[in-house]
Amino acid sequence: EDSNTTFNIYPVPASQTLFLEHEFNETFDYAIFNTLGERIEHGQMNETQLDIDHLLKGQYFLKVESEGKSYNKKFIKI
């Protein structure tokens, strides 16, 4: 992770929506993984919100990639 770039998610735990705090200047790739490392969802976005209402309750990892750098955050869906 690049410590010079801000990337945070909240609230954790979350039930319907994850809010992303970031400084990315462009559309970025994202992926959600379960605790087994299986990719559950992926795509591109440039938003500050990610709908997680459709996920089953449990622990997940959000990976985003922007400008050749990768950022990972753990979250819990309740």
Image (cartoon, grey):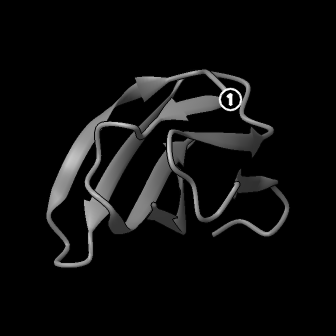
Residue placed at 33% from the left, 69% from the top? Answer: 58
Corner quadrant of residue 25: top right
Viewport quadrant of the C terminus? bottom left
Residue placed at 73% from the left, 53% from the top? Answer: 7
Q: Position of residue 35 (x, y in %)?
A: 26, 77
Decide: few, some or many residues near mark 1? Use Cα within 10 Å; few <14, some 14-19, many ≥20.
few
**Residue named by callout 1:** 48
Question: Relative to the observer, which residue lies in front, 70 or 33?
Answer: 33
Q: Secondary structure at mark 1?
A: loop
Q: Position of residue 23 (x, y in %)?
A: 80, 38
Q: Is residue 7 left or right of residue 39?
A: right
Q: Is residue 73 left or right of residue 35?
A: right
Residue placed at 41% from the left, 65% from the top? Answer: 61
Question: Relative to the observer, which residue lies in front, 8 or 64?
Answer: 8
Q: Position of residue 40 (x, y in %)?
A: 19, 50
Most distant residue in the bottom direction: 36
What's the residue type where badge 1 is placed?
Thr
